[in-house]
C-alpha cells in the first residue's frame, strides 16, 4: 500500500507531495523523471520489502508506480510461465504488461491504482481496480495532466478552483457521484477503468475495462447448496490470498456481525495466531460480547478497543479535512479512531467491506426483493403519497414505524428520487431548498440510473447495482481508505475479490433476501463457522450518535460554521431554510435534521480549512 503522484508536462514538487501524502508511504520515497513524465512514489512496505522499491523499471522501456496489492500475482506467474528477478507484485504488473498490454487487467485479483509509462511508445497507462478500492484523481488542462492518490495532494500542487455545480451532487448524495470532485478540471478515475495517454499529443482516452452491470444480467442457475459450497470455496480463496500476500502480520477487524466473523473464522485457518480487534464506544451498541464469542472460538489474539469521543470537538476538523473534499459519512470518525488504535499493533488488517452490497445486507433491500418500486405504477404512487401525508414524521431511526414511513415516502416518488430516498436520504423532500443551479445537476446520474432500471433484471438487482456504483464506490471505500491510510494502515477486503465480484451479482435473489431475512446465503454459511448468537443479528455497523453530536457535543462548532456570514452554503441552499433548521423550527424529524446539518457542516469545514487554505 502506497501513495503515488505523477504528471505529464509538469514538474512535481516532491517536497509538497511528501507534505500531503507521507502517511500513505512513510517507509520510502522516490521520484523518477524521463521525457516529459514525472513520477513519485511513497511506499508503505508490506510485500517483498527488500525487492519492491519503486518507481520500478523493466527493459529500460517500462516504468511503473503502483498503489495497492495484487493478491494472486504468484499464481499468475506460475500459470502463465512468467519469471522475474524479484517476488514483488509490482514487477508482476510490468511483466504482464509487456506480455499482454492492457488485457493484463483481466488476470488481476487485487486492489490497485497504478501508472505505467512506455518510453518507446510514449504512452502512459493508468488503471484502477474493479471496485475502485484504491483511489486515483487527475487534473487535466490543455497543457498538462497531473494525478495523485488523494485530492489534498493535487490541491497542494495546483491552484485548483471550486466547481459549484458538483456540490449539488454532494448535498443530495453525501458524496460525489462517480468521477465528479469539488474542483474544476479534476476527475476521479472511475472504478474498473483505465486511461491511455499519449504523452506526445496529450490525447487521453478513458476505457471501462470491467463493469458489474453485466454480471447482474447473468442468471446463475446454481441451487442453494451448490451456491453455498461455491461461496465457501471462493471466500476461502479470497481470504487465503489476502493473509498470505504479505511479509508483515495480517490481522482482522471483528465486529459482532457475520461478515467480519466469516472473514476472521476463515483467516484463522491460515494464521492460527491472528490478531483481532473490536471497537466499542459510548452511546452506541456494544458489539464486543458477540465479537468475543468468535475470538474465543478461534483462539485469536483479541483486543477490545474502547473509543472515547471526549476529544472529538478538537479532532473533527482534522478528520474531515483528511478527505480533501466534503464528506458526509459520520462513521468516518470511529473508522479513523479504530484504525489509529489498530496501527499500534500491526500494519495490515482484513475487513468485511462489500459483503452488504454483494449479498443483500441492508434492510432497505427487503421491499425491493418483493416489488420493483422503480417500475411506474400510478396507483401505488398515489396511495403511498396519501399515507405519507397523513403520517407524522418518524422520530426513531431504528423503529418499525420509521421503516414504514420511509417506505411510503420512497414509493410516492419517481425513478431516481426513489433510489435517493431509499438510500442516504439527506435532502429528500427538502431538495427544493437547494438553489442556485440552472440545470438538471443530477442529469449524469439520472442517465446511468435509467440504463440500470430499464435492464432486464429484478428490482433488488437494480438497487444493489446502484449501491455498488455509488454508495460503495463514492462513500464506503473512500471512508475506509482515507481513515486507515491516514494512520498508515492497509485494509484488505476479501469480499471484493475478483471471483466473488463476478459470482455474487448473478445469484438468485432469494439467496440474498429471503422473506425479511437479509444476506440469506451468508447467514447459511455462517452456521458452519460462527456461534449461533451471531447468525440472525441485524446489520448495525457503527451506530453513530449523530443526533446527540449535533444537539450537544458538537452543537457549538456546527452552529459557528453554518452561521458564518461567508459560509459556502449561502451560495447553494435557501438561507431561510438553513436558519429555520438551525433554530429547529422546521417540521422535520430530529434524525433528518441532524443529517442535513452534518452534511452542510462537513462541507463548510472543507471549504474553510481545505479550499480556502493556501
Image (tube, rainbow, N blue to C red):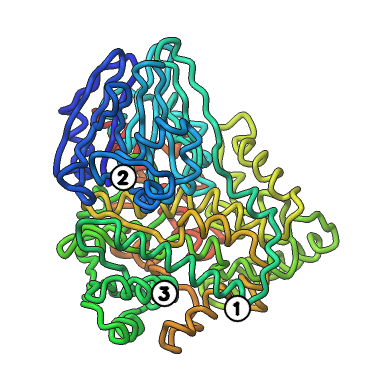
Left or right of 16? Residue 538 is: right
Q: Residues within 10 Å of mark 2 (few under 14, many from 20)?
A: many
| Mark 1 burial class by Cα count in 10 Å: few <14, some 14-19, many 20+ | many
Q: Can you see residue 572? A: no
Q: Which residue is denoted by mark 2 in the rendering?
A: 89
Q: Earlier in the sequence, mark 1 or mark 2?
A: 2
Q: Earlier in the sequence, mark 3 or mark 1?
A: 3
The image quadrant of residue 302 is bottom left
Residue 273 shows in the view: yes
* Residue at image location 15% in from the left, 28% down from the top: 15
Nearer the observer: mark 3 or 1; the answer is 3
Question: Which residue occupies the foreground of this view, 127 or 161?
Answer: 127
> Which residue lies most toward the front here?
81
- Quick one: label 2 or label 3, which is nearer the N terminus? 2
Please tell me which residue is depicted at 26% across the width and 29% down the height of the picture.
Answer: 57
Percent coordinates x, y for residue 264 in the rendering? 35, 73
Quadrant hosting residue 82: top left
CB contact under 8 Å: marks 3 and 1: no
Residue denoted by label 1: 517
Disc 2 secondary structure class: helix
- In whole angstroms, how far apart are the C-alphas of marks 3 and 1? 18 Å
Residue 340 x %, y %: 21, 59
The answer to whether residue 241 is left or right of residue 173 is left
As drawn, the residue found furthest toward the bottom would be: 532
Q: Which residue is mark 3?
A: 262
Q: Is residue 514 above or below residue 533?
A: above
For the residue labelled by badge 3, is the local secondary structure a helix, a strand or a loop?
helix
Viewer-side label of 1, 2: 2
Q: Secondary structure at mark 1?
A: loop
Please state which of residues 24 and 103 is positioned toward the viewer in this rendering: 103
The crowd level at tag 3 (other Cα within 10 Å; few <14, some 14-19, many 20+) is many
Residue 110 percent across, percent down from the top left:
40, 50
Amino acid at each position: 500500500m502506497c501513495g503515488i503522484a505523477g504528471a505529464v508536462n509538469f514538474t512535481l514538487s516532491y517536497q509538497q507531495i511528501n507534505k500531503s501524502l507521507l502517511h500513505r508511504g512513510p517507509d520510502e520515497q522516490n521520484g523518477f523523471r524521463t521525457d516529459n513524465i514525472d513520477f513519485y512514489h511513497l511506499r508503505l512496505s508490506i510485500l517483498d520489502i527488500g525487492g519492491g522499491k519503486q518507481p520500478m523499471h523493466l527493459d529500460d522501456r517500462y516504468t511503473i508506480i503502483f498503489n495497492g496489492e495484487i493478491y494472486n500475482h504468484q499464481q499468475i506467474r506460475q500459470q502463465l510461465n512468467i519469471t522475474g528477478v524479484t517476488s514483488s507484485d509490482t514487477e508482476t504488473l510490468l511483466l504482464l504488461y509487456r506480455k499482454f498490454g492492457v488485457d493484463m487487467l483481466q488476470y488481476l485479483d487485487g486492489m490497485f491504482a497504478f501508472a505505467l509509462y512506455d518510453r518507446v511508445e510514449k504512452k502512459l497507462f493508468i488503471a484502477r481496480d474493479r471496485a475502485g478500492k484504491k483511489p486515483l484523481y487527475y487534473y487535466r488542462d490543455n497543457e498538462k495532466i497531473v494525478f495523485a492518490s488523494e485530492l489534498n495532494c493535487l490541491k497542494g500542487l495546483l491552484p485548483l478552483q471550486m466547481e459549484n455545480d458538483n456540490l449539488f451532487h454532494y448535498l443530495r448524495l453525501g458524496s460525489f457521484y462517480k468521477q465528479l470532485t469539488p474542483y474544476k478540471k479534476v476527475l476521479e478515475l472511475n472504478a474498473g477503468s483505465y486511461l491511455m495517454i499519449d504523452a506526445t499529443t496529450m490525447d487521453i482516452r478513458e476505457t471501462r475495462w470491467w463493469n458489474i452491470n453485466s454480471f447482474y444480467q447473468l442468471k446463475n442457475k446454481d441451487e442453494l447448496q451448490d451456491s453455498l459450497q461455491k461461496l465457501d470455496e471462493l471466500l476461502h480463496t479470497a481470504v487465503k490470498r489476502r493473509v498470505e500476500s504479505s511479509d508483515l502480520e495480517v490481522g482482522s477487524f471483528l465486529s459482532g456481525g457475520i461478515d467480519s466473523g466469516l472473514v476472521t473464522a476463515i483467516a484463522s485457518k491460515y494464521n492460527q495466531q491472528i490478531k483481532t480487534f473490536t471497537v466499542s464506544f459510548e452511546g452506541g451498541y456494544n458489539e464486543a460480547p458477540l465479537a468475543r464469542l468468535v475470538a474465543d472460538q478461534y483462539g485469536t489474539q483479541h483486543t477490545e478497543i474502547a473509543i472515547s469521543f471526549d476529544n472529538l470537538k478538537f479532532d473533527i476538523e482534522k478528520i474531515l479535512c483528511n478527505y480533501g473534499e466534503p464528506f458526509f459519512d459520520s462513521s468516518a470518525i470511529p473508522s479513523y479512531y479504530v484504525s489509529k488504535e489498530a496501527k499500534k499493533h500491526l500494519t495490515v488488517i482484513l475487513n468485511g467491506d462489500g459483503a452488504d452490497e454483494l449479498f443483500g445486507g441492508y434492510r432497505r433491500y427487503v421491499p425491493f426483493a418483493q416489488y420493483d418500486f422503480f417500475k411506474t405504477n400510478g396507483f401505488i404512487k398515489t396511495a403511498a403519497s396519501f399515507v405519507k401525508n397523513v403520517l407524522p414524521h418518524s422520530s426513531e431511526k431504528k423503529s418499525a414505524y420509521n421503516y414504514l414511513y420511509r417506505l411510503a415516502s420512497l414509493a410516492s416518488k419517481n425513478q431516481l428520487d426513489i433510489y435517493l430516498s431509499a438510500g442516504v436520504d439527506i435532502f429528500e423532500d427538502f431538495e427544493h431548498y437547494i438553489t442556485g443551479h440552472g440545470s438538471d445537476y443530477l442529469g449524469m446520474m439520472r442517465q446511468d440510473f435509467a440504463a440500470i432500471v430499464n435492464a432486464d433484471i429484478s428490482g433488488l438487482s437494480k438497487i444493489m447495482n446502484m449501491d455498488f456504483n455509488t454508495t460503495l464506490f463514492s462513500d464506503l471505500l473512500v471512508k475506509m481508505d482515507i481513515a486507515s491510510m491516514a494512520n498508515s494502515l492497509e485494509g484488505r477486503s476479501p469480499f471484493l475479490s475478483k471471483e466473488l465480484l463476478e459470482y455474487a451479482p448473478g445469484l438468485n435473489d432469494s439467496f440474498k433476501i429471503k422473506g425479511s431475512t437479509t444476506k440469506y446465503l451468508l447467514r447459511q454459511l455462517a452456521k458452519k463457522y460462527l456461534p449461533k448468537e451471531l447468525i440472525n443479528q441485524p446489520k448495525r455497523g457503527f451506530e453513530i450518535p449523530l443526533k446527540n453530536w449535533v444537539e450537544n457535543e458538537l452543537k457549538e462548532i456546527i452552529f459557528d460554521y453554518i452561521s458564518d456570514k461567508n459560509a459556502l452554503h449561502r451560495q447553494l441552499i435557501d438561507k431561510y431554510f438553513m436558519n429555520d433548521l438551525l433554530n429547529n423550527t422546521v417540521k422535520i424529524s430530529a434524525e433528518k435534521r441532524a443529517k442535513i446539518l452534518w452534511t452542510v457542516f462537513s462541507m463548510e469545514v472543507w471549504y474553510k480549512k481545505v479550499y480556502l487554505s493556501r
